[in-house]
Amino acid sequence: MVLKITDISQRIALSVVILLSLTIRRSQGEQCGQEELARCSRPLQVLSSTSDLTIATNKEELNEICPDLYGGLHCIRSYTRRCMSLQHRNHFNKLYHGTNQVIRDLCREGHYQNDYLRHAPCLRMVKPDYEICAKKYQDTISRVTQMEHRGMANGTDDD
């Protein structure tokens, strides 16, 4: 199995975007707001391509970050149970499954973790260039999203 930084980053980025854009129940108050969801997903940002943290390159570093990653997953799972309808939760879980699996595979001894650790020094070396590309991508997505929202607000949505 060949591990690519784009696989991890794309799964994490997609999941975070979906997380932040899902409709949530407002009746739960602050515990179900965007801030709570952002707080839950913060530990997962260590895996994103634009993280300020460095890529774990050995087993000890993975052992340090994995408890936080699992904590983030637990927090998100709790959030979805409290704050999302069954339909939204099922949809979310389908979309978020890849992120959960990446974290489980990364933090559990086995082929995936071994492949990751073998390629981690290379990933760390190319990360600065990848971050530039990821930032441009995120900026483009933000602009497109803003344009879509403006179009819907102006009644020009073609859907």
Image: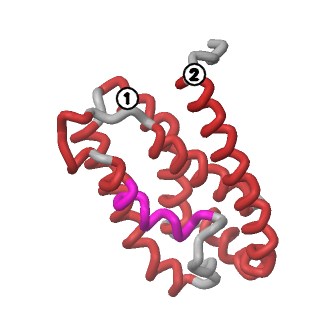
Please provide percent x and percent y for residue 137.
73, 52
Residue 153 among magenta residues:
no
Please provide percent x and percent y for residue 58.
60, 84
Q: Which color scheme did the rendering employ for the protein? A: secondary structure
Of labels 2 and 1, earlier in sequence is 1
Type of amino acid under label 1: His
Tell me if I can see residue 3 in this picture. Answer: no
Element assignment for label 2: loop
Of labels 2 and 1, the one closer to you: 2
Q: Is residue 112 left or right of residue 75?
A: right
Residue at figure coordinates x 68%, y 38% from the top left? 144
Residue highlighted by disc 2: 154
Residues in magenta, as a range: 38-48
Disc on res. 88? 1
Element assignment for label 1: helix
Mark 2 closeness class: few <14, some 14–19, many ≥20 residues within 10 Å: few
Type of amino acid under label 2: Asn
Residue lying furthest front: 154
* Main secondary structure along the magenta-highlighted residues: helix
